Every structure is written in structure tokens, then in C-alpha cells.
Image: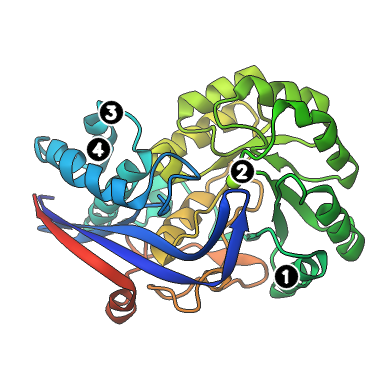
Amino acid sequence: MKLTGFELRVIEMPLVSPFRTSFGVQTVREALLVRAVSDEAEGWGEGVAMNDPLYSSEYVEASVDVITRFLLPALAQVKDLNASGVAPALAKFKGHRMSKAAVELAILDAELRAAGVPLSRELGAVRDRVDCGVSVGIMDSIPELLDAVGGYLDEGYVRIKLKIEPGWDIDPVRAVRERFGDDVLLQVDANTAYHRGDARHLAKLDPFDLLLIEQPLDEEDLLGHAQLAKAITTPVCLDESIVSARAAADAIALGACSIVNIKPGRVGGYLEARRIHDVCVANDIPVWCGGMLETGIGRAANVALAALPGFTLPGDTSGSGRYYSRDITDPFVVENGTLRVPTGPGIGVTPDPDALEAVTVRTEWITF
Ligand SMILES: [Mg+2]
């Protein structure tokens, strides 16, 4: 396969409702799509950087810049480039994992489409459907939260995740437990909003039998997470801290987490995501697939990853309708609490040209 060029496309997708986390409120998802064009097939990748550097240091405009100025020129120097050669060729550039992941997925998708192989099979998937959880943002009031959670349970979601922050933690969890009972699979995500001194406060979540608490402390505070894990009974799960398979191995060895949220964008791509899966499986650490408000492109690839054997907890792999009234691909629809793993070659979905055009802010073509 000979790559001939890349299209970078910045899109803006309006969300069906504002999504509030401890980082702030989001009403539109700005994202970068990468289309890799070769002499045999074209492939799509989706960047998960947000428009502000809040979840991580990356953001959309920086992604466009680093891909254009550094990543693609470096890849253009590689003879017989294929997807597994992308990460080694880009390793000399520090960080920028979300940008690297978007480029790698586009090339991987093109390669798999040319070979007629589905991404799920390439990664080692063992299921044809995956369980769907949903991430519920911070609300203005408890009644509003209960309405939202009730709606998602009615839609069939099998696991509820509540975003929390200081001032919105114990009471919302108690309210959801009281209204919907102890059988609902329930977990919380703090997106780094707490500090080491909050251990006693976070221990107040222990009686609610949560599946996990996700990333309570700063992303660089592995030791703090290890200490917290000893001080509370709710299992600690890491998200932002796990940027590579090595980071996962370190966190596990330190006792900083007993569950890992895998997000391919955060770790530099689906191939590194699979390595993290393998490290976790070898250590008996359950994993689940996180989400970054992906369009159908990233969602398709996430669902393929979530079908691997170590993904034993429901992910944030929600239906498209959770975020978008009109997705750029055929929408992913929740049926019996599950999403179907795409079976077509590559990621198995292709954007609809009209839907894509409607959300495009600008495109840039880079001849390879
Ligand atoms: Mg998270």
C-alpha cells in the first residue's frame, strides 16, 4: 500500500445536551478527523483532543499543527510505512499521543480495508456485541440528575457513571442509589478533581458499593492514588494517568489502581491500547473502554477494542444518540444494553458525505 496523502478536517458537532465534568461545560465537540489516502484504499482516524487543554495538554489546533509540521513529514521518510511502523517512527516526538493515535488509526484503517480485515479481528476481539455504559455529567440539581439517569436506564444502559467534583459527589450517589436501587452498576469519575487530603471524604462513598472511582487525583500522582486505594474500599480506576503500557505496568505495581480505563487516543493509538489490555490481563486487572465523545468513526474503533477478552466491565461505549442527534456515520444504536461490533473491513463505518460536510469547519490536504 502506497500512501499518497492525508486530509485533516476540523469538525464541530453540537451535543444533544451540555456535558459538564469537573473540567467545565461542553456544548459542542470540536474534533479533528484524519483521512489517509493510499493507492489501494482510504482510511479514517479521529483525534480525541478537545478544543481546550483541560483533559490533557493536547487540544485540536495543536493537533493540526503537530501533525502538519512534524508527524506527517517524519512518516513520509519511512520506507514501506505501515500502521505498526507509525509509533516507532514518531517516538522521538514527546507526548502528542492523541495526534499520533489519529494518524495511526487512519493508516491502520486504510491498511485493513485494503486487506479486507475488520479492526476487531485484527485486535483480537472475542465478542460480536459489547455492553454499553453511559457517562452522566454534573447537573444543576439532584431531580435533574435522577431524570437523566432514569432515562438512560430506560434506554437499556447497563452501567451508569456519574461525573463528580467537590460539592457534587456523596449526595448525588446516595440519591441515585435510593431511587434506582443497589443492583444498578454504578461508578463515579472525578477527572482529577480531588487531593490527597480528601481520602476521608471520599471514603464516604464506600457504603454505596460502587464499581469504582475513576481518577480522583492528579494525573501525575500515582503515589497518592496508591495511598488512597488503601484508605477506601471503593476500587480505584485510573484514566488520565495511564498514557502507555509502561504507565499501566507502573501503576499496577505501585497499587495505584485495581481497574484501568483504556482510551486509545490518550495512549497513542489502538496498538498501544491493546498492549495495555495485555499488561492488565496478565496482572488480573479488569479493563473497560472509555470515551471522548467520539463520532461514529472513533466509536466504531472503540467498540472493536471493547470486544477484546480483558474488557470485562461495560465501557463508556454509548449509542451515538447519547451525544449527537445526527452522527457523521450510520448511528450506533443501543439494543438490549449492547452495541454491535462492526464487521466490515477496517473500522467498518464510513462517514456520510452530507453529514460530514454539515459539520466541517475546514479541511487541509497534505500530499505525502
Ligand atoms: Mg475519565
Mark 1 in CB contact with mark 4 (< 8 angstroms): no
The nearer-to-camera label among 2 and 3 is 2
| Residue to which mark 1 is pinned | 148
What is the C-alpha distance between the residues marked 1 and 2?
20 Å
Q: Which mark is residue 86?
A: 4
State the CA–CA distance, disc 1 to disc 4: 41 Å
Q: Residue at x 23, y 35 (%)?
A: 85
Residue shown at 71% from the left, 54% from the top: 162
Q: Nearer the viewer, residue 172 or 263?
A: 172
For numbered disc 4, what is the local secondary structure? helix
- The kind of residue on which mark 3 rests is Ala
The correct choice, above or below, for 149 with respect to 282 in the image is below
Q: Residues within 10 Å of mark 2 (few under 14, many from 20)?
A: many
Q: Which residue is mark 2?
A: 191
On the image, the x and y values in percent for residue 12 come to 37, 67
Q: CA distance from mark 2 to mark 4?
A: 29 Å
Secondary structure, mark 1, is helix
Asked if the residues shown at circle 1 and circle 2 are in contact, with their CB atoms under 8 angstroms apart, the answer is: no
Q: Is residue 352 left or right of residue 310?
A: left
Q: Which of the two labelled residues, at mark 1 and mark 3, occupies the earlier sequence position? A: 3
